Amino acid sequence: MRYFNFIRTTTLIAGILLLNACGSDTNKNRLNITGAFALYPLAIKWSDVYKKTHPNIRFDISGGGAGKGLTDVLASAADIGMFSRDLTPEEKAKGIWSIAVAIDAVIPTVSAQNPSLKALLGSGLSQEQFKTIFLSGAQLTWGSQLGTADSGKINVYTRSDAAGAADTWAKYLGSKQERIKGIGIYGDPGLADAIAKDPEGIGFNNVAYIYDAKTGHKYPGIEVVPIDINGNHKIDTDENFYKNSDAILNAIAKGKYPAPPARELYFISKGKPVDPEVIAFLKWILTDGQAFVKEAGFVPLEPNKIAEQLSKLN
């Protein structure tokens, strides 16, 4: 009996050592990145390109919202968090470190099947109208906002997860995410899908979930609500920059699209990174990696901003 106990014990120890060795090899040179859906497509693009010259690096990238990126970084469950809003003083006090990596915007969206689409594209909606729709909780009709006879009720959608997009959109409305009144949907892809399927719905999405980066066209089923920036109840030529991804990205880059909801996107970590692989990847993102930003449907950083972010890594 003692012999078999010895064999079992020896086998168990050997198994543990083997598992530890395998785990060490598996996790070596692996970067775990989680967080904002806004940055997910760009992080995937960057990782695909980076691996071509750094084949020893493995990436685990997942969305889940800015809140998940923050939680995972604080718990040391991720090397990098994708973050799509400014850090609060409380978050900074917890030792969260950040660098800006790109720029995009949150854009109001409706279904391409909206019965009032023609009127909506012609007049857009003003900031005050968006406040009424998203914050009042009142049951409004499209006709009441567009001055038409459309009695269809407006169905408001928002994000159910702690999202930088929702926070940024709420900031544009002078409020906070929790004050947006609407049907909560998890994630950017889920919200885009819900809007596309509801002809009476209205919500908001990040640029990458409205426009196909490969074609530049809007994804089927979704349409943009133009922002009537000057409040004159019509979309003037200098406000009409939603036709394709190039047009909206240029408008964001030149400051024609309001900020917010235009905003910087960040990579965050718990304290300044010390892992050489993480630092090398972040430096690449801020240098060679910027060449792939617009290709993925985002706005690259300006040279002075890049220099400022690089200095944080030195």
Image (cartoon, rainbow, N blue to C red):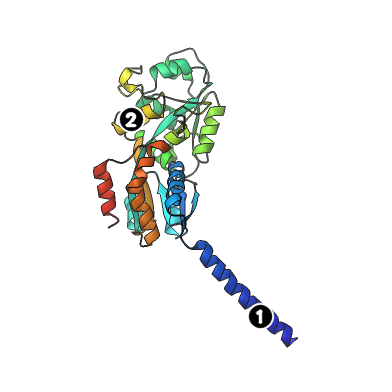
Residue 248 point in image, percent of width and height: 37, 29
Q: Amino acid at mark 1?
A: Thr
Q: Nearer the viewer, residue 153 or 250?
A: 250
Classed neighbour count for the residue bearing mark 2: other residues with Cα under 10 Å, few (<14), some (14–19), many (≥20)? some
Task: Indicate the secondary structure of the residue bearing disc 2.
Answer: helix
Q: Residue at x 47, y 35 (%)?
A: 209
The vertical placement of 205 against 242, above or below, is below
Measured as percent of width and height from the top left, residue 61 is found at: 49, 50
Is 44 left, or right, of 100 in this rendering? Answer: right
Query: Where residue 283 sits in the image (x, y, percent)?
Result: 33, 52
Say if residue 142 shows up in the picture. Answer: yes
Instruction: Using residue 90 as the reference point, say whether residue 200 is left or right of it.
Output: right
Q: Which residue is mark 2?
A: 250
Return the x and y of residue 17 as percentages of the image width and height.
58, 74
Residue at x-position 26% and y-position 44%: 305
Question: In the rendered structure, which disc, 1 or 2, sits on the residue that comes first in sequence?
Answer: 1
- The alpha-carbon separation of the residues under discs 1 and 2 comes to 66 Å
Farthest front residue? 53
Q: Quarter of the image for the C terminus: give it.
A: bottom left
Residue that sits furthest to the left in the current view: 304
Q: Which is nearer the eye, 191 or 180?
A: 191
Residue 9 numbered tag: 1
Instruction: Verify CB contact (< 8 Å) between mark 1 and mark 2.
Output: no
